[in-house]
Image: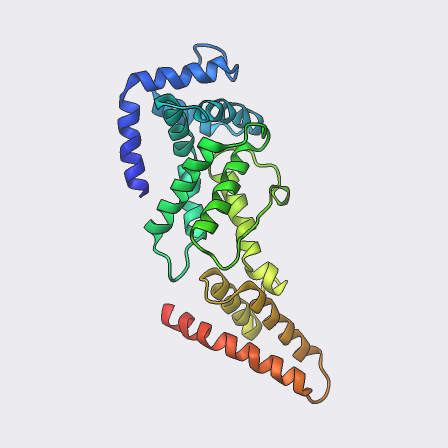
Amino acid sequence: MFAGLDAEWALVCADPANGTLVRGWIEEAGVVPDGTLSQDLRELVAGLAARRDAAFSDRWLSALLERAAGDGEQAQLAARVVVQAMVPGMVRLTQSLLTSRRDFDDVAQVVVGCLYVVARTFPLRRRAKVAANLVLETLHHATRELGADEVREVRLDDLPDVPAVGGDVVDRVVQALLVERGQVQRVADVADVEGAEGELVALLAWGVDHGSLPVQQARSVVEVVREEEGRAGAASPAERKRRSRAVSWLRPVAAEWVRAA
């Protein structure tokens, strides 16, 4: 999917008129002084995306998104430029949405399709953290398209300020997504664990991340383990039932984990 996007982008950049159009939009919006941007579309977009300045990123992305909200070939070009600028991050976002039952290319098609829709329908009143908003909206659309059991509602307020369009903003979103999905810190609330407890944490995180274990079940297992550690004397019938249920949840996940290893 992403190789195809790169091949298509080469064709888009081969037309010098496209570079002239995009440069004109950026200059008209007052993002940069006239004549300072490259006339080559590939170099122009790479240079814009490489600037590690959140306010600058907001301005040039907003200029393109305003154009993308219109009709016709120019609107499609503007949206395509936004998509291309976000491609490196979309690879990582795709990876974060993979499970044992999802093929990379299938997920990539959903992610890129959702990003294109988001670029064409972006609410232009949002002038701050534009790149983060693009990633989050794409994530929420893609999660629904993929039919996930849980909609991962990573919120913009959960993210610290990010300096750039490229990998940084997506890495922050993916990090928040993985925490929400129940990775080690959220599921077990421990760090640098070793031994049997560490193996259990790794199993829980793997199961959640691969779609084999719902987040709530993982948290329930952690609660059972903590009850066992803190209990003195024989377990009650209710405690034994919770323990048995936790084991029944973990048994198929452990089998998948072993096969994957």
Q: Position of residue 223 (x, y in %)?
A: 64, 72
Colour scheme employed for the rendering of this structure: rainbow
Q: Is residue 164 above or below residue 146?
A: above
Quarter of the image for residue 88 reads: top left
Residue sitting at 42 percent across and 41 percent down?
A: 114
Closer-to-camera residue (66/40): 66
Residue sitting at 51 percent across and 79 percent down?
A: 248
Question: Which quadrant is home to the C terminus?
Answer: bottom left
Q: Is residue 28 left or right of residue 227?
A: left
Q: Is residue 149 left or right of residue 188?
A: left
Q: Outermost residue toward the top?
A: 34
- Residue 37 at least partly seen: no
Q: Outermost residue toward the right?
A: 232
Q: Outermost residue toward the front?
A: 71
Residue sitting at 61 percent across and 37 percent down?
A: 161
Closer-to-camera residue (34/123): 123
Q: Position of residue 9 (x, y in %)?
A: 31, 30
Counting the numbered discs, the total is 0
- Residue 141 at least partly seen: yes
Q: Is residue 120 above or below residue 185?
A: above
Q: Position of residue 81 (x, y in %)?
A: 39, 28
Q: Position of residue 170 (x, y in %)?
A: 49, 42
Q: Is residue 134 above or below residue 184?
A: above
Question: Which quadrant is home to the N terminus?
Answer: top left
Residue sitting at 29 percent across and 40 percent down?
A: 3
